[in-house]
Each structure stands twice: as structure tokens, then as C-alpha cells.
Amino acid sequence: MDSSSICAPAMVEALEEAAGNLGMKVQHEILQFGGTDTAMLQRSRAGVPSGAVSIPTRYIHSPSEMCAVSDVEDSARLLAETIVNVLHEEEADE
């Protein structure tokens, strides 16, 4: 959740399941200030179920913003696993 959106429960569940499959720990985040592009996705067309993955950073929005490369790689793995799981669920429903 951030100041402009609340993630769809189904997306949160899909991300948590993928994290569990990968043995990753999950930390829920509530941003009291600021927002992400998630809100724009949620409001497009008739609405799109959306979720968000945050990568821990320091000095955000500055010329020297930094993060651990492993956190970026883990986030990519998490998103890929989530997509694969959702696609398999859709195939099973057909």
C-alpha cells in the first residue's frame, strides 16, 4: 500500500506464494508518503488488479541512489515466478 493505491489481495497472495516457492522472506510495506506507478495501472480501463514489489534503496531520488544488486536480481526472480504461477493457474482453469 502507498498513498495512492492499495494492492489487490489476489496479487499480494500470488507474490507471497511465489516468494514462498523461492524461499524468500516477505516484508509488507505501507508507504505513508509518495506513491508508485501501481495506482496508474489500477485505474486504467476498467481497472487492473495490481501489486507492487519494492527494492530496498538508500538515498532515493538522488544522484547517488543505491541498492544491492542481489535485491534487484531477487525481485526479478520473484516477478518471474509470480508470472509463471499465474499462467499455470490460468491454464489449469481452462
Image (cartoon, rainbow, N blue to C red):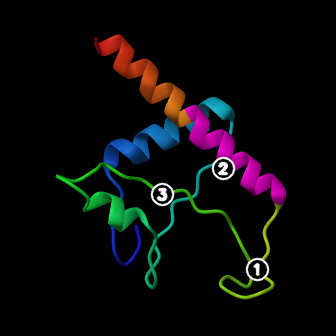
User: In the figure, is residue 40 to the left or right of 57?
Assistant: left
Give the SS element for disc 3: loop
Q: Which residues are magenta?
A: 69-81
Give the SS element for disc 2: helix
Above/below status of 49 relative to 37: above
- The picture places residue 4, in percent across and down from the top left corner, at 34, 75
Q: Which residue is mark 1?
A: 65
- The picture places residue 73, in percent across and down from the top left corner, at 75, 48
Q: CA distance from mark 3 to mark 2?
A: 11 Å
* Local crowd size for mark 3, using a 10 Å CA cut-off: few (<14), some (14–19), many (≥20): many
Check residue 75 in the rendering and tell me which mark sits there, or answer none. Answer: 2
Check residue 54 in the rendering and tell me which mark sits there, or answer none. Answer: none
Above/below status of 7 relative to 77: below
User: Quadrant location of the N terminus?
Assistant: bottom left
| Residue under the image location 28 percent in, 11 percent down | 94
- The verdict on residue 62 being magenta is no
Q: Which kind of residue does numbered mark 2 sit on?
A: Ser
Which is more N-terminal, label 1 or label 3? 3
Q: Which kind of residue does numbered mark 1 sit on?
A: Glu
Q: Which kind of residue does numbered mark 3 sit on?
A: Ala
Above/below status of 20 relative to 39: above
Q: Main secondary structure of the magenta part?
A: helix
Q: Which residue is mark 3?
A: 52
- The verdict on residue 78 being magenta is yes
Which is more N-terminal, label 2 or label 3? 3
| Residue under the image location 55 percent in, 56 percent down | 53
